[in-house]
Image: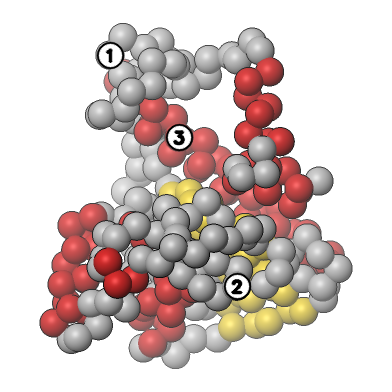
Amino acid sequence: AADSVHFTAAFGVSQPLARVLVLNQDGKLSNEVGVRRSPRIARRIKTDDKLLRYILLDSQPSEHSSEKSRASAEKKGRGNEYCDYFDFKKLKSNRIAYGAVLSGRKEGVEDVAPSSEHSEALTGLSTFVDFVHTKFMMIDVLTDNPTIITGSANFSIASTEQNDENMLVIQGDTAVADVYFTEFMRLFVHFFSRDKRNESLGKGSKSPRAWIDVVEDDSWMKPFFDPSHQLFRERVLLS
């Protein structure tokens, strides 16, 4: 990819994909990845990574499950190779959203989200996935030569290493790409907004602002014109 990558991952991200997501555009380990796994995987590499990657998950991964998987990888002698959501979420070039209902209010902060009397809840109709079950990847979707990969594989460990799956690769069809891109961003923006709102009201959050507080000056614009900021890259990508 030279421009952007967008993909859904209902059941997590397989190791080959996760390892790519901690690399910069030059194929080197980004210095934005901390030493959560091992000091040996942290290298000081300066990068001007303009590639943006959007990942849509069904739910927020569990750190407990992550540590169990890491421990299992270490037992097999692959601890230094293991990486997952808690590694690649640190990169500015990776923008991540996951399914969620709106959580309760934060004490002392006004909010227009549903009160406990009318709170959101899942229907329980599906016990397999809660929010996201679409399965597709888009590479350079806004260029004149987009690639769409869609089918039964969901880019999880099981689907990429164990299951019999069917995938269709559609190359260079901008009309098809536009349809997939519109649907992806409809879902992504919907859940990304919820994730940020829930984070702002979550335990340990230092934000005193309500979810929908209006910013009355031009301070909100600054990240969009700061070349080091992810929102600058997104403005350029979508313009």
* Residue placed under numbered mark 2 in the picture: 26
Sooner in the amino-acid sequence: mark 3 or mark 1: 1
State left or right for residue 193 relative to residue 69.
right
Element marked by disc 2? loop
Q: CA distance from mark 3 to mark 1?
A: 17 Å
Which mark is in front, 3 or 2? 2
Residue at image position (68%, 82%) is 169
- Percent coordinates x, y for residue 83 in the rendering: 34, 69
Colour convention of the picture: secondary structure
User: Is label 3 in contact with label 2 (beta carbons under 8 Å)?
Assistant: no
Element marked by disc 3? helix
Residue at image position (13%, 82%) is 75
Q: Quadrant of the N terminus?
A: bottom right
Residue type at mark 1: give it: Glu
Residue type at mark 3: give it: Lys
* Residue placed under numbered mark 1 in the picture: 107
* Residue placed under numbered mark 3 in the picture: 196
Residue at image position (52%, 78%) is 152
Q: CA distance from mark 3 to mark 2?
A: 30 Å
Q: Tag 1: Cα neighbours inside 10 Å, few (<14), some, or many (≥20)?
A: few
